[in-house]
Amino acid sequence: MLDKFYLGLTQGRRPRAGRTFELLIRELFVVLGFLGYPFTAQAVIDGQPDFVIPSVEHYRNNPMDCVVFTVKRTLRERWRQIVTEGAPGLGFFLATIDEGIAARDLQEILDSRIILVVPKRVKQSRPDYTAAMNVITFEFFFEHHLDPAMKRWLASNLIA
């Protein structure tokens, strides 16, 4: 009886924790909005990624020039959902704080053109994360992926 009760509590907290993580990432984009990072949240494209950058309208016209950004607190096998959440863009970026991704999964994730975006502490937590080409920090994502795209979008008058 108590086992069932505690299991119910645990299962009830997991979706809230995932939603909280998503809201934190959204707030990161909003707080950094003074830098002009535009996004559409929860856009329905070929799935429903958490964020399409710079906009769902631009994605519909030119998906190869957009960033598809999804948030999952933990992965397990759920990272496979990402490739169904949109047509090929600049790549799929998946924010996570999961420190337990198996090395074989890291390779499969790379083969699926998914880049994991993690806090610096998580990136440095394991040698295989540090060595993986597709595990980057949030700082690296903004500096080497989003900021160059912003310059391109500004130069083409796509964003103000």
Image: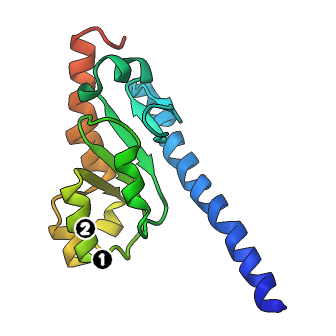
106 sits left or right of 5 in the view: left
Placement of the C terminus among the 4 image quadrants: top left
* Relative image position of residue 39 (x, y in whole percent): 44, 28
Mark 1 Cα shell of 10 Å, populated few (<14), some (14-19), many (≥20): few
70 and 99: which is toward the camera = 70
Secondary element at tag 2: helix
Q: Amino acid at mark 2?
A: Leu
Cα–Cα span, label 2 and label 1: 6 Å
Q: Are marks 2 and 1 in contact (CB under 8 Å)?
A: yes
Q: Which mark, by number, is residue 102? A: 1
Secondary structure of the residue carrying numbered label 1: loop
The residue closer to the viewer here, 45 or 116, is 45
Residue that lies at the very extreme toward the top in this rendered image: 157
**20, above or below 62, in the image:** below
Foreground pick, 60 / 42: 60
Which residue: 76% across, 83% down?
6
Quadrant where the image shows the N terminus: bottom right
**Disc 2: CA contacts within 10 A as few (<14), some (14-19) or many (>=20):** many
Q: Quadrant of residue 132?
A: bottom left
Q: Which residue is mark 2?
A: 106
Instruction: Measuring from the top left, give residue 71's x and y in whole percent.
Output: 46, 51
Residue at point 41%, 23% (across, down):
55
Could you say where residue 66 lies in the image, as x and y percent from the top left? 30, 29
